[in-house]
Amino acid sequence: MVGWLEEQFPPESAESWDAVGWVSGDPSRPARRILLAVDPTAEVAEEAVDFGADLLVVHHPLFLKPVHGFAQTTPKGRTVDTLQRAGCALYTAHTNADRASGGVSDALAHALGLSQVRPLVPAAPGSGAGMGRIGVVAECSLEEWVGRVARALPVTAGAIRYAGDPAAVVRTVAVTGGAGDFLLDAVVDSEADVYVTSDLRHHPALEFREKRGQALLDVPHWAAEWTWLPVLAAQLRSRLADTVVVQVSERVTDPWTGHAIQMEEDH
């Protein structure tokens, strides 16, 4: 189990600032029940315990920044305590899973119906790994594409924002799971008609639009990355056959709980 995860998502391929791999628990202990989730929240830890999981595999790190302790009085401390009391280990695959072949960005691309998918920025010439993905879709308008994306992603309280002419033609699409403004320049230099990612900030998005006028879709972070979990579950079931039970958490850990549409007042 340990070897397969690290073969698929090599820890050394993660960004230098990232915190991936085993967080707690004994890697040598057999895992017979595995829960997959995006975020290691205290509620997700309780879900893992209720499921009887031996292992919780998450995308986002529990401890991305150094800490001096994790007392039960803190949310992260409660997560660790809940898992440890139940004998459930915790493993993180973050930026190493983002760029891996068959990882997060690949899963998002296929969930949105892209074909001829390849890395936007390959890890090496001809590699299936790398940052972001780019592919083609059946020709449609930007407005139609936004609708397709909305239907393909799990529902959250967050809205999908887009920038561009609703009638613009979409044929080639770039995607990145999670916060993807670090790849905006690579998208500008690509043939993409639209870029789908999350957590776009005002100034980078404005500057991007001023360059070539390519469209942008800003989708909820959790929803985009959740698309990887069913893919990972299928990989684990195929690899481990009948020796494990794998479950995907459908608990929405997106932090936003609602949105309002602002309407212009009549004067």
Image (cartoon, helix red, strand yellow):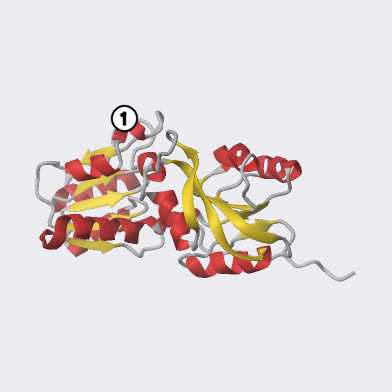
* Mark 1 surroundings within 10 Å by alpha-carbon count, few (fewer than 14), some (14 through 19), many (20 or more): few
Looking at the image, how many numbered discs can be counted on the residues?
Answer: 1
Q: Is residue 218 left or right of residue 8?
A: right
Question: Residue at the spot x=59%, y=61% of the render?
Answer: 160
State the quadrant of the C terminus: bottom right
Q: Where in the figure is residue 246, as x and y percent of width and height?
A: 22, 61
Q: Residue furthest right?
A: 267
| Rendered position, 163 above or below 4 | below
Q: Is residue 37 visible?
A: yes
Q: Where in the figure is residue 38, as x and y percent of width and height?
A: 37, 53
Q: Is residue 238 left or right of residue 182?
A: left
Question: Residue at the spot x=20%, y=45% of the render?
Answer: 4
**Three-letter code for the amino acid on which mark 1 is drawn:** His
Question: Residue at the spot x=21%, y=41% of the render?
Answer: 24
Q: Is residue 222 visible?
A: no
Q: Which residue is mark 1?
A: 68
Secondary structure under tag 1 reads loop
Q: Where in the figure is residue 10, as x and y percent of width and height?
A: 29, 37
Q: Nearer the viewer, residue 226 or 211?
A: 211
Q: Nearer the viewer, residue 55 or 234?
A: 234
Q: Is residue 213 left or right of residue 175?
A: right
Q: Where in the figure is residue 58, as x and y percent of width and height?
A: 31, 50
Q: Nearer the viewer, residue 71 or 142?
A: 142
Question: Residue at the spot x=30%, y=62% of the render?
Answer: 248
Q: Is residue 75 left or right of residue 256?
A: left
| Rendered position, 88 above or below 169 | above
